[in-house]
Image (spheres, helix red, strand yellow):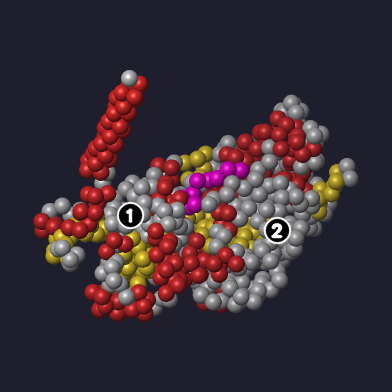
Amino acid sequence: MNSDFELEKRKYVIGGAAVAIIIVFLLRLFTLQLLSEDFKISADSNAFLKRIQYPARGAISDRNGKLLVYNQPAYDVMVVMTEQVGVDTLDLCESLGITRDWYERRMEEIKDPRRNPGYSRHTQQIFMSQLSTEEFSRFQEKLFRFPGFYIQKRSIRWYNYPNAAHLLGDVGEVGPEDIEADHYYRSGDYIGKLGVERSYEEVLRGEKGMEILLRDARGRIKGRYQNGKFDVAPIPGRNLTMSIDIELQALGERLMTGKLGSIVAIEPSTGEVLCMVSSPTYDPRIMIGRQRGKSQKQLAKDPHKPLLNRAIMGQYPPGSTFKTGQALTFLQEGIITPATPFPCSHGFHFKGLKVGCHGHGSPLPLIPAIATSCNGYFCWGLYHMFGNRKKYKTVQDAMTTWKDYMVSMGFGYKLGIDLPGEKRGMIPNAPYYDKAYRNSWSGLTVISISIGQGEVNLTPLQIANLGATIANRGYYIIPHVVKEVQGIPLDTLYTKKHYTRVQPEHYETVVAGMRQAVLGGTCRVANTTYYEVCGKTGTAQNPHGQDHSVFMGFAPRENPKIAICVYVENGTWGATYGVPIGALMMEQYINGKLSEASEARATEFENKHLYKVEWSDRSDKSDRSDKSDKSENKQNAKETSEEKRQ
């Protein structure tokens, strides 16, 4: 009886297991046939070849229509893993000029989903990129010997000028993070890496197309499927017109040869960047094609950091250029009037504290103080502001008011230029000093910020924007390097006026001081009879070496066309490098050329080097002097050396 029951029970168990197995097989069959695309892809790949059609990337021109960047034909070698049967790998390697080790390593990279997200053995994968026309011609003759390998036409960027590398940027192969961030890309695609190529990638790249080709049972191409009925044409990228003047840019790079630093020039009325020089620089043409990786490694090893865009990433003490912002703040807050005099006995001396200054008349009012770059005047101004208990309840309140003025002038935060990598600089606030000095500090403690030293740091872009704001008598438009995108209106971000907290009449006082600096003060080298230049020098203390030479100015005085900042690391006095370089740049832009005498002066500055230069493709590669990059963050200077009379 029990044995019959056991047999009956076993029958149901076996039957149930058989049913379960059948259900599993049915589910798997349903998944493969209806849900999974593996077999569909495999079948389609036997009948069709879907070839991506890459769009032409948008061209880039300067403000005067001179072509800067355009496309040249290049060719990629593609491989379909399921089709490469019986390939003579030795012949393939010889035809492409590669080694067997390189071939095997590349194949492993293609199959590795970590390095090649979205890999499929049924679809084309990039094997080797950017063959030249000559390499393509040689390989094309033998292509029939290598089943599974195809040629795909692409384009690479080409640069008409050896200038503006930091602005233009470059294009390189996408990485896994790019593919993950935007599903438009797949392995082997190219993306803008730096400069406007990066920030305007979506408008420059265009939209891919697709060509569907019909194949026979042996994989041979028989033509377009249904005469191209289902093909999708690529949409070309949009062209960019940059705001820079390439001739001005080239002159700036020439003048900064052998120097560390930056030049930024802005058109005040529009915020358009006329040039942006970061030195040392490099020829953008060394970042083209398969040499890009090697060139990038060489540049990255350079101790002078040619890949660093100092114009927007360098954070420096602004020195005496910052005094213009202090004068505006003191005037608006009623701390001084244009006629208010302060003493200066070779500097600011009070309660044992000393901030040095060069010799000049004393006491003196505001306009001569700006013209002679008097340290004492602006130290006294900050001391009276931070100690004014009728206007501010505490020093913290005064500090907060001061900081709000600085922020309204475009300091302490990123301006928002249309380039990647911009830094914000440093404007200290009351909590910063409360923490640093345990709530026990006064205007005397932080007196050096009044002359652009101490904890204050700005980028050259911010200093140039200060010049543009003064030129406009109280407002700025966010600086931008692209003037026009084909078919798209300029973002309102780059057309809106940003007003400071200072009234226009106070700007006129500061303009008068800057004009006097050119006529008889620290900026005399910039004076010319052709137009009125307004300027302000800076000698920014550098505790790790020679002081930095700074110039900020604009021209003409009325209806200004250009505002400029020149920052030369380790250049000593502002009048030594900053002023003459700035004067040449303004002449080039306003007059359209340099005079014969100015051309000779430009050659002289081109040959004045502050470190040893051995140019190789404009990339500063080897045999440098031991004078290393003087860091962009010099925040703790206690005293200052200011401009001397010439």
Q: Give above or below for 606 relative to 65.
A: below
Which residue does the numbered mark 1 point to in the structure image?
120
Closer-to-camera residue (21/222): 21
Q: CA distance from mark 2 to mark 1?
A: 61 Å
Q: Which residues are magenta?
A: 412-420
Q: Amino acid at mark 2?
A: Thr
Q: Amino acid at mark 1?
A: Ser
561 in the magenta segment: no
Q: In this image, 15 relative to 170: left or right?
A: left
Q: In this image, 77 relative to 367: left or right?
A: left
The label number, if any, that marks residue 539 in the structure image? 2
Q: Residue at x 68, y 47 (%)?
A: 456
Mark 2 secondary-structure assignment? strand
Query: Between tags 2 and 1, which lies in front?
Result: 1
Q: Is residue 274 visible?
A: no
Rendered location of residue 1, percent (x, y): 33, 20
Q: Give above or below for 489 relative to 357.
A: above
Question: Few, some or many C-alpha atoms within 10 Å of disc 1 (few <14, some 14-19, many ≥20)?
Answer: some
